[in-house]
Image: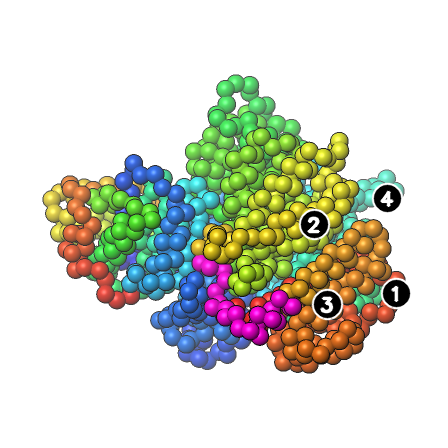
Amino acid sequence: MTVATTWKQKLAGQMREDWAREIDIFETQIELRKKGKVEEKLFAETRLRRGTYGQRYDNGQRHDGEKTQTLAFPSGELTKGPVTMWDAPGMQRIKIPYGKLTADQLDTLSELAEEYSDQILHITTRQDIQLHFIHIEDTPDLMRRLAAVGITTREACGNTVRNVTACPYAGVCNTESFDVIPYANALTFFLLGHPDTQDFGRKFKVAFSGCKDEPCGLTNFHDAGAIARTRTVNGEVKRGFEFYVGGGLGAVPYPATLFDEFLPEEELLPITQAVCRVFARLGERENRARARLKFVVKKLGIEEFKRLVLEERGKLRPDERWVSFLSDLHVTDEKPLKPGSELVPGRYPDGFDAWRRTNVQPQSQKGYSTAKVTLPLGDFTPAQGRLMAELARRYTGDSMRATVEQNLLFRWVSNADLPAFYGELAQAGLGMAGADHITDVTSCPGTDTCKLGISSSRGLATELHKQLTVIAEQLDPAAQGLHIKCSGCSNSCGQHHVADMGFLGVSRNMNGRRVPHFQLVIGGQYKNNAGSYGLAIGAIPSKHVPKAVKTLTDRFVAEKLAGETFQAFVARIGKKEIRKLVDQLSVIPSYEQDPSFYSDWGDPREYTIGDLGVGECAGEVVPLVQVGLANSERELFEAQLLLDDGNSDNAAARAFSAMVLAAQALTREKNSFLGEGVDEIVSEFRTHYYDTKLFFDPFAGGKFAHYFFRAYEHRSEAGASKEGAHQLIEEAQLFVEAAHQCYTRIAGALP
Amino acid sequence: MLSERLQLKLYLEPSQHFEVEALIPVFHRFIREQLIRELLIDVVDYSHVPNGPGVVLIGHGADFYLGALDGAYGLVYSRKRGGPGPEARLEDALRRLIDAARLLEQDPTVQLRFKSGELSLRLTDRLHAPNDDATFAGVKAEVEALFGRIYGGEIAVERLAASGKEPLSLRVRASGSPALEALLEKLGGPPSVAS
C-alpha cells in the first residue's frame, strides 16, 4: 500500500472533481506567483475569490508602541497583492451556506484551526467560519480538506455572491410561513460560479427569513432579501417571497427596497439571476465606494430598476435548475436522532435553569427544543468544536447552525435530554447563559486582525462581556434583552446600526495625543429583520464606554414605561438627553494622570504614537481646527434632532452645514484668509485637500470628500425625504470623521 | 520527527494565582525588545474563551500560547513551519520553549513559576503524524532519548487522547524538576537565530 505524502494524494477521490480541479489551479497560481509569472493584482483577486484575505500588518510594518518595526519575512519582497507581503499571515474565510454545519464538517474545521491557525475557530456575523494567521502556502491543503467534507471556499470574498445567510431556526420556527432552507440551498449552488455572477464591481449578499417580524434573517440590509410568504389562490396555498433589493450597511446604510410583495417560488432563481445581470451591467466599476447594488437602486429608482430586471428576466435562456429543486423541497429536511419528549422535573445541573431561560426555545415540533451555545465573540477551540460535533451525533442527528450573533445553534434536542446536553457543554466551558442577550456582545475583528480597524472592537466587546456578566443575573429583564454590537470602523461588519447600543471605532486627538474612541449609535432596530438603523450620537473615549453602557442601561430600567422598548425609550427622552451623557464622558484625564485612556482595550501599546511637537504654529492652529471640528459635530447632532422631529429638509441642510464647518476648519489651516462663503470653502477645500489627496483616506481614497462635493451640488434641492436626510447625515458623519483623521495626519500624530 | 508541526507545553506550578491578561503587555514587550529569537508579529487576547489558548504571541514560524487548552495553564511553543530538519526538530522546540519560559519567570510583572519536569507534546500534523500506535512508538523513543539526555534519570512517557480525531499527544515526566537555566545550558543556551 502506498502511503500518501500529501493531502492531495490522501484525499484523491473524496472531493468533487470540479472543486478538486479548482484547488489544483489555485495551487498552480501560487507557484506561478512565487516565480513572478502572475501579476500581483491578478493574484490578489484570485485568492480573494477563494476566501483568502489579508490581515493587519501584512504590509510588513508594525508599530510596537514606540516605533514602527519592519517584519523581516523570509520571502523578502515577494507579495501576494499590492503592499501585501507573501509571508504575512492572512485570514481564511470559509463559506457555510445558511450556517448549516454537519458534525464531520465541524471536526474538519477543528483540525484545520489546530494545524494551520491559532487554535481558534471564529463565527462571523454572516454565518461564515474564519481562521486567522494562515500562511498562503497552507491554503490549498486546507481547501482540499474542506472540499472532502463538502465545503468550498469559492467566492467567500471578492466581488462575488457572498455566503447566503438564513434564519437559523428555519424549519423548526414557530412563526415562519415555511422552511426557507431548500430555497436558500438551491440559490446558493445556482449562483455559485454562475457566469452571471463573475463580473461584479462589488460584492453581493443574499439573506432569507421565514417571517417578517423577527430579526433572524436581517434581510433589510442585504442586496437581495427574501421573506417567506404564502398566498391562497383558488383555494390552493402558493409559496412565494416578499422580495427586497438594494439594502446594505457599510459606511452609509441603506434599507432594502421592496421589489415584489409576492415573488412566486418558481421565479426566485431567475429573478435573482436577472438582478445579478443588471448589477453586473450597471454597477459602478471605478468608484468602489459606490459600487454596491444599493447605489444602483438608489440612482435608478425602484420602478426603473424593476423594469430593467424584468426586461432582463424576459431575455434569460431557460434553465431547468430554476424549478427542478421544487420537486423535492424535503432534500434539506433533518431527521431527529431521538423521539420528542418532555423535560422531566428533577434536580438539574448547576446553571441549567439560567441557561435554559436564555438559550433554549421550543421548536414548532412537539417535544423538541433548539439550544444555543454561547460563544463569546464567536470564538471556540478545536477541542470544543470536536465536543460539539460529538454532541450533535449523540443528541440531535448531525445538524448545527452558525448564527449571525456568532453563536452555534443545535436543533432537535429532545426535551428530556436538555439537562444532560447542558451538563456536557458546561464541562467543556460552553455552558454560558445569555445567548443573544446583553452580555453576548457581537463584534467584528477590529484592530485585532483587520487592516481597516480603527479601534479595538473585540477588546471593547470582551470588556463589556466581562463587566456585564458579573451583573447579568441582577439586571432587569428588559435590560437583559438589549443588544450591543461593536464595529472597529465605519464599515459596519459588527452591524452596529441595528443594535440597541451600537459602537463604531473612531479616533480623536486630545491633549496632543491620539485617543481611541467609539461613536455611540442609538435607535437601531434589531427586530423586523433589522427594520431601522440607528444614528451616531457622539464619540466616547474607549475606556469610558462601559460606563456609558451602564448609565444608559440603568436609566432605561429606571424610567421606561410599561412594555417600552429601548428604541421607543430613546425616542421619548430624546437624543439631547443621551448626548448629555456623551458630553459628560468625553472628558478624560491627562496622559500624566492616567495613561490608560491613551491605549485601547486589550492592547497596552500607546494609541497615540506620534512624537507630537507643540511648535508655535501648531500651538495656534491646532486648537482652532479642533474648535471647528467640534462645531461641525454639534451641527450634525442638531441635524439628527431635526430629523427625529420629522423636519427632513432642515435636517439635510444642517448635515450639509456640518460638512462645511469641518471643511472650513481644516482649510483655514492652509488659508488663514478663508471666509464664510460656502462656494469659497468648497473651492479652497478642493484645492488644498482633494487635489493634493491630503484628505484621502488610506483605504477609502477620496470617498468622503465626494460625499461633501455631492451634497454641495444638491444643496439647493428642497423636499428631502426622511430617508434622504438620514443618508446625508450618515455621509456627513463620515466626512467629519475623515476630517478628524486628516487633522491628525497633518498634525503629525499618525505614522 | 516527521511532523513539522508540533506543540510542546510546559505547565505552570498550579498554586499560582494570576490573570492571564497580564501576559499581554509582557508579550508586546517581547516583540518590541526582540527578546525571543523568532520573527514575532503580534499578540492576540483569547482570554474570553474558556479552556482556550489564552494570550497568544503570534510568530512567523512559531507561536507561543499562555493558556489552558488542555485544562491546565502552561506555556506552549507551537512550531508551524520551517525550522530545523526532522532530527533536530524536537530539541529545537524544547530549547525555544525553555528559553521563553525562563524569560517569563524573570519578568517581575507576572512572576510565573513553571514545573520544569512535566511537559506535553502534541503533533499537530495529521498527514505525517497520525494518531496511531506506530507513530506513537517512534515518537516515544525519540522523546525518551532527548529528555533522558537533557533531564537525566528516568523519563516516563504516557500517551494521551486515544481518539483518532485528536492529534497524537504525549505527557512526559522527568524524575526531577531542574532549574530552567540549567536545562537551557544543557540545550546549548538561548537560540541564536530565528527559526
Labels 4 and 1: the sequence-earlier one: 4
Q: Residue at x 75, y 31 (%)?
A: A562
Q: Chain of mark 4?
A: A
Q: Are marks 3 and 1 on the same chain?
A: yes
**Quadrant placement of the C terminus of chain B:** bottom left
Q: Are marks 2 and 1 on the same chain?
A: yes
| Dot label at residue A718 | 1
Q: Residue at x 76, y 78 (%)?
A: A680
Labels 4 and 2: the sequence-earlier one: 4
Q: Which residue is mark 2?
A: A579
| Residue in front for this viewpoint, A692 or A54 | A692
Specify the color scheme.
rainbow
Q: Which residue is mark 3?
A: A661
What segment carries the magenta color? A605-625
- Residue at the far left: name it: B153
Task: Verify whether residue A527 appears in magenta.
Answer: no
Q: Nearer the viewer, mark 3 or mark 4?
A: 3
- What type is the residue that disc 4 sits on? Val
What percent of the width, then of the height, locates residue A443?
A: 57, 51
